[in-house]
Amino acid sequence: MDLNLPFNLKIHHIIKNGSGFEGKVTFRGREYSIVINAQKNEKIISVPFPVIGIDENEILVRLSGKSGMYVQDHVKFKGRTKILEIGSNIIFQEIANNKIKFDTIEVFVK
């Protein structure tokens, strides 16, 4: 089943691993791996499920937490991969610089 934007994913955990972050998220009852890296040149997102209505368009990705804290960035959709991948220097730095626990990823049409 193809998915329309917007959609939300539940974050279980995100931990530092080498030069990036990795973790687990849940979407529609299935668990997926996530990787978040710093990316200055081309900010991207790739997802492990089909999404209709976008072809390398810029979309809004927001991570938020129960405290009301959030970080967001406009990134290019790069299609389907085996894991959820986010390449964004803004999102990466916010996770690295804060002890805030993000629990949700939201993906919107810009």
Image: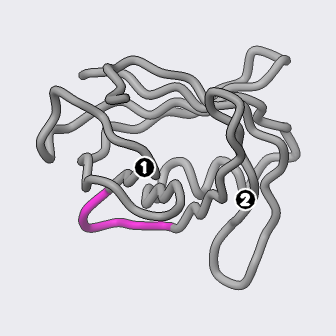
Majority secondary structure of magenta residues: loop
Q: Which residues are magenta?
A: 38-43
Instruction: For marks 2 and 1, give the CA distance.
Output: 22 Å
Drawn side of residue 72 relative to residue 104, left or right: left
Kind of element beneath mark 1: strand
Reply yes or no: does residue 40 show up in magenta.
Answer: yes
Residue sitting at x 47%, y 21%:
7
Q: Amino acid at mark 2?
A: Ala
Drawn side of residue 46 relative to residue 26, left or right: left
Protein image colouring: one colour
Q: Which residue is mark 2?
A: 96
Q: Looking at the image, which residue sits at the far front?
A: 1
Q: Which residue is mark 1?
A: 47
Specify few, some or many for label 1: CA neighbours under 10 Å numbering under 14, 14-19, or 20 or more: some
Residue nearer the viewer, 36 or 55: 55
Nearest to the eye among marks 2 and 1: give it: 1
Q: Position of residue 102 (x, y in %)?
A: 76, 35
Q: Earlier in the sequence, mark 2 or mark 1?
A: 1
Residue sitting at x 71%, y 31%:
29
Above or below, 13 against 96 in this view is: above
Q: Position of residue 73 (x, y in %)?
A: 41, 38
In the rendered image, the quadrant that contains the N terminus is top left
Q: Quadrant of residue 49?
A: top left
Residue sitting at x 48%, y 59%:
85
Residue nearer the viewer, 80 or 6: 80
Reply yes or no: does residue 58 show up in magenta.
Answer: no
Q: Position of residue 11 (x, y in %)?
A: 75, 38
Kind of element beneath mark 2: helix
In the rendered image, the quadrant that contains the C terminus is top left
Q: Looking at the image, which residue sits at the far bottom?
A: 18
Q: Position of residue 91 (x, y in %)?
A: 55, 48
Drawn side of residue 28 relative to residue 45, left or right: right
